Amino acid sequence: MKPAWRILLGKELLDVARDRRTLVLTVLLPVLLYPGILLLMGAIVAAGTQRLKNEPLVVAVVGQATAELLARKPVPEKTTFQAQARAEAERLLRDQQIAALVEAPQNAAAELEAGRQVVVTILYTKRFDRSVEALDRLRPVLESINTDALELRLEARQLEPGFVQPVKADAVDLEFQKDLGPLIASRLLPIVLLMMLILGALYPAVDLTAGEKERGTLETLLVSGARPVDVMAAKYLTVSAVAVVTALANLAAMAATFGFGLSFGGKATTTFQLSGGQMLTMLACLVPAALLLAGVSLTVASTARTFKEGQSLMSPLMLVCLAPALLSQMPGVELNNLTALIPLLNVALLIKASVLGNATLTQVVLTMGSVLLFALIALKVAAKAFNSEVFRFGGTEGWRALFGESKSAARQSKHR
């Protein structure tokens, strides 16, 4: 005869498979949604960039000296220079009627002839994209004027161009000069995978605890003769399985999206292929993380009396669990032997390091061990919740009753 927990596990998995809402919200929708969002974002950015390049822009030219200086070079395409007073030009810029304004000193030509420096002011605003596009169009014009003036000065003094720049830095990205795919993937995958892992654990946990209380099926399950530990084991394994499947399905979808290639309107490509080793490394951290989140989510969800109350409890929990994924993207936060011991943060950092090819075996082992240790602690707390009145009735006193029970039990054993 099969153990009770195996029978209950089969029943819970069957219920999850039959629950179309759970499958759609935790597996199918994210798998289709996030790759679709990435592709749509790439298409929108590329189309927006191209639209800005083709959009007619008006740039205010303040003063005759500025007009004479700019007249040395052709006007950028799709751009119109319009003479304006400084105060009026600033007002038009704030009202978004012009894209930018340019102003040079009144004696700009004389200063250049005398071999001195001329400071040309470009006034723009980041409040609207057309102004930033105007700045991008004006920079090459002024740089070209600067190059011509510099060449004349060097020629007059019979100096080589290298005289003014004895050392020139040429920064070449060893890894991502041509392909930004791994870099973008290292920023997106930790957040997306952890978020999907959290959602994959939280929603089934609420449905299998508070949802069953609300539907009235929990009482039937508890009076069936099954031990609370068997009920807890079945629900725990079910939530863990759904979380792992959700995370892996999203990993496969994101890998396929990057493998297909994304375009954001720039020259660099964004393609990325996950190797077998990278997939195994991510699997090695995602599975223990699923066990950890399953225990935490079941503990929290068991204190709720209704499905709505359970969702309310899960909202702050989701934000807390997602914070390490966001923290992993902060500058200077990298995977090392210390951060590999911090739960969830180590998972996000390991995914990031794996994509970039920086993960070591020691860091993988430390991450797995740390997450598994916290998963055991979460499992112990979840088991305590399932063995207490909190699981059966929930309520606002759930947490106090849960942890107060252990204190009272300790006092009783001491008196004995």
Image (cartoon, rainbow, N blue to C red):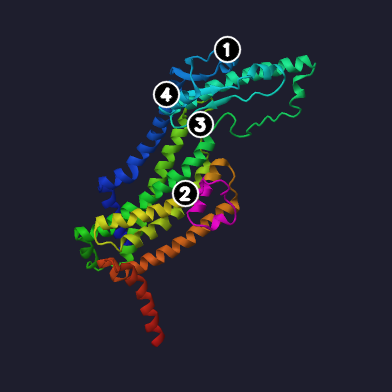
Residue 387's quadrant in the figure?
bottom left
Residue 222's quadrant in the figure?
bottom left
At horizontal 70% and vertical 19% (from top left) the residue drawn is 150
At horizontal 37% and vertical 39% (from top left) the residue drawn is 31
In the image, what residue type sits under mark 3?
Thr
Residue 240 visible in the shown view: no
Q: Which residue is mark 2?
A: 325
At horizontal 59% and vertical 45% (from top left) the residue drawn is 358
Q: Which residue is mark 3?
A: 271
The local secondary structure at tag 3 comes to: loop
The mark closer to the camera, 1 or 2, is: 1
How far across and down, in percent of the image, does residue 399 sit?
A: 34, 68
CB contact under 8 Å: marks 3 and 1:
no
Residue 183 visible in the shown view: yes
Of the numbered discs 3 and 2, the one sitting upstream in the chain is 3
Q: Is residue 339 in the magenta section?
A: yes
Q: Which residue is mark 4?
A: 47
Is residue 245 or residue 86 the one in the foreground? 86
Disc marking residue 71: 1
Of the numbered discs 3 and 1, the one sitting upstream in the chain is 1
In the image, what residue type sits under mark 2?
Ala
CB contact under 8 Å: marks 2 and 4:
no
Q: Quadrant of the C terminus?
A: bottom left
The mark closer to the camera, 2 or 4, is: 4
Specify few, some or many for label 3: CA neighbours under 10 Å numbering under 14, 14-19, or 20 or more.
many
**Image: magenta residue range:** 326-351
The local secondary structure at tag 2 comes to: helix
